[in-house]
Image: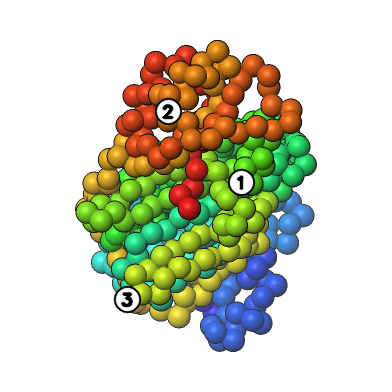
Amino acid sequence: MIQMAVLGFGTVGGGVVEVIDRNQDVIRKTVPQGIYVKYILDLRDFPGNPYNDRVTHDYQDILDDGEIEVICETMGGREPAYTFTRKALERGISVCTSNKELVAAHGPELLEIAKAHNCSYLFEASVGGGIPLIRPINACLTQEDITAVFGILNGTTNYILTRMEKSGLSFENALREAQEKGYAERNPAADVEGHDACRKIAILSSLISGKTVRYEDIPCEGISRVTTVDFGYARSINRAIKLLGVSRKLENGKLSVRTAPFLVREDHPLHSVQDVFNGVFVHGNMVDDLMFYGRGAGKFPTASAVVSDVMECARNIGRNIGCNWSGEILSIADPKEESYRYFVRVGKEEEREAGELLHADFMVHYEGAPADERAFVTAVMTEREYEEAVKSLSSVKQCIRLLQD
Ligand code: HSE
């Protein structure tokens, strides 16, 4: 049997153990020797849990065992996940992870260590939850010049936005539901402020460019300022508000990358991606548009993706599964040069001035809109032009980009 260990017995780690147990017969069709979880590392004990006898509090037990060939790092966060991962890879033990924070921060370095020690560092579950996305990009699309990847990359915020839109739930109640369902990060700010989606688009951008796109370089806005009033306006122009990660190759070869809420037209496939589901478009120069869709968070979908990596490692013991991602930093395109149409809400008193400065194209109304404000969609402007124009206005309440049609 392939012996493995799970680091972190939380939602995803617990899911990994259960998937391996419940689907052992299915797994054996591809990995005939089977997979056995020998250790679970956690600070806690789990009295009454059938796996409690496998729990250790000492990582050294796992490293020194001598039989462990694969480790699932489902702890999340930078440390001690980084140190534990390094130590495992340096001993030739493959590591599979759902930890996008660690992958975004140290991916290329850990990939190098894995290569040097004939083992693998795989991270299918780090983007898109249960959606097979990383392996298709790394294995099925290596013949393509991938010119764009964009979509809904965070299940929690998509769940919140859907509940606000469809059921009129408050932001707080929708977030609480997402937390109860095990979708949200330990610190929900990582979801609602867009950092999680930003790390995911950084990982995808790195994979399509082969270099490192630092998430710190990517403009990042979350959904904490989106209100039910915005949904009222959005509905009246047949759009939904979605938090998107967007990465596009420009004609000059640079990559333009951003994470922000966007107004998405109802005839766009991303419009119908609801609840915890993620939807990701990949555009290749030969294959054209591909769309990947599935549950972007949650115990079993995420665990399923981790276990798919474990099986890939089990089939490649003693070999490195390569990945085209170097540590060279990619300088991304100037975000201020991006052009959009913007949905803007301003105080009624600045209606005329705002309309002129921001080149209002058409007004947006809905029954129930606050009487003391006006809303409109601008003509196409660069970010720089928008920022300049808005400086002389004092009553701008909202600005959301329209996804280019
Ligand atoms: N909090 C993340 C999300 C978990 O909601 O998408 C999966 O990465």
Question: Which mark is first along the chain, 1 or 3?
Answer: 3
Query: Which residue is tagged 3?
Result: 143
| Mark 2 or 1, nearer chain start | 1
From the viewer's perspective, is 44 left or right of 361?
Answer: right
Mark 2: secondary structure: loop
The residue that appears at 59% across and 86% down in the rendered structure is: 29
Q: Residues within 10 Å of mark 2 (few under 14, many from 20)?
A: many
Residue type at tag 2 = Leu
Which one is earlier in the sequence, the residue at label 3 or at label 2?
3
- Give the SS element for disc 1: strand
Expressed as whole percent of the image width and height from the top left, the position of residue 183 reads 64, 48
Tag 1: amino acid = Arg
Which residue: 29% across, 59% down? 209
Of residues 102 and 37, the one drawn nearer to the viewer in this rendering:
102
- 9 to 311, vertically: above or below: above
Q: CA distance from mark 3 to mark 1?
A: 35 Å
Read off the residue under disc 1. 239
Residue 358, disc: 2
